[in-house]
Amino acid sequence: LDQPVYSLSVSEKQTVEILKVLCRGADKLILDEPTAVLTPQENQALFEVLAAMRREGKAVIIITHKLDEVMAVSDHVAVLRKGKNAGTVKTAETDRFRLTEMMVGRPMDLDIPRTPSFPTAPVMKVRGLSVVDPGGRHVLKGVSFDLKGGEILGVAGVAGSGQKALCEAIAGLEKPAEGSVEMAGQRIDGLSPREIISRGVSMAFIPEDRLGMGLVGGMDLPDNLLLKTYRAQKGPGLSRKAARAQAEELVLTLGIATPGIGVKLSKLSGGNVQKVLLGREIRLNPKVLITAYPVRGLDIGASMKIYDMLNEQKDKGVAILFVGEDLDVLLGLCDRVLVLCQGQVSAIVNTKFATKALLGMKMAGLTTDKEDEYV
């Protein structure tokens, strides 16, 4: 009880925040994506608390994009589409398919696609990777794994388990304190993104912050494409003609909804922004693709398009690191899942044998063995 809140994990802080509200005797509780940083076991405990509040006559509003949670805990569902109420229905009188149709405006197949896996030799080798934050705390400690061509390796963990540090250390945005990252026969740990590119290493990074790190919201589509290639152009000026042609091609092939390629990206929806970012990166034919929460905040239609794009890259032999928060997506899309707990690898499991319960226990650090039989 004497432990400072700042030293708690993100999920523990979330639990404290919820308990604080409950202790105040709130009659109305509004939760915005409350399970994003919780394990499945913690989710269940939260749902039991909410059910008890309902029995006591209290009102609860949960804002979430996870349909399974909607069906499990709610009595009524209000669906928003493009900022408007697409309808309100009784949960007992609807299902996931109907809710999805209300969300996107058309029927959708909810099965997450996964193409057969034919992994090659490791394309990237990470050994003993550790990252220390400015306060001297290890946010990543001794992480080791191989990333193979032609596979999607998922990364699971409650928020704040080291996912961000892992991606940025590999991509050259964070200098590791210890360990190595090897690709194409050479070490790239500690190098800047520009140095990594100059060495001919073919890697793309889709960051969590799309319009902060990945793209510039105040620029149009052609200019955002140029951000990746302008250093390779020769001569005193930039050729925007080629960039405009590439932008038009992306709009057509990826179904990007935009009034025109000259519109600022900040005016586009999150799904269309993500298509631009992912489309720009895969145009360069990377051998390794690192994606951090690529479908966060996207509707089911946009998410399915992103899954298809990732599977296409996998079929081409690209090695993909997929950091996600939805265990159903990780189990459905990925071939293997690496589980992080407090900055350390608690397991690497084959999704043919893994379950949500197993991943949840590993995320919470409830078991100590590495489940080698599932690797």
Image: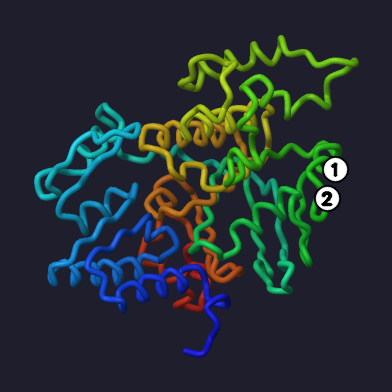
Q: Is residue 141 left or right of residue 337?
A: right
Disc sitting over residue 195 in the figure: 1
10 Å crowding of disc 1: few (<14), some (14-19), many (20+): few
Residue 280 in percent (x, y) is at 63, 28
Query: In the image, what residue type sits under mark 1?
Result: Glu
Q: Residue at x 72, y 48 (%)?
A: 171
- Amino acid type of the residue tagged 2 in the rendering: Leu
Q: State the image coordinates of residue 30 (x, y, percent, origin top left).
A: 31, 59
Residue at 65% x, 68% y: name it: 139
Q: Is residue 250 above or below residue 90?
A: above
Bin the neighbour count of mark 2 within 10 Å (Cα to Cα): few under 14, some 14-19, many 20 and up: some
Q: Are marks 1 and 2 in contact (CB under 8 Å)?
A: yes
x 22%, y 38%: residue:
97
Residue indicated by mark 2? 191
Outermost residue on the bottom side: it is 2
Picture coordinates of residue 10, whole percent (x, y): 50, 68
Dot 1: element: helix
Place residue 250 in its image quadrant. Answer: top right
> How did the renderer colour the structure?
rainbow
Q: Report the residue that reaches farthest toward the left.
A: 93
Q: Is residue 161 left or right of residue 226?
A: left
Measured in 3D between alpha carbons, the distance from the residue under mark 1 to the one under mark 2, in whole angstroms, is 6 Å
Q: Residue at x 81, y 43 (%)?
A: 196
User: 245 or 1, which is in the foreground?
Assistant: 1
Front in this rendered view, residue 1 or 196: 1
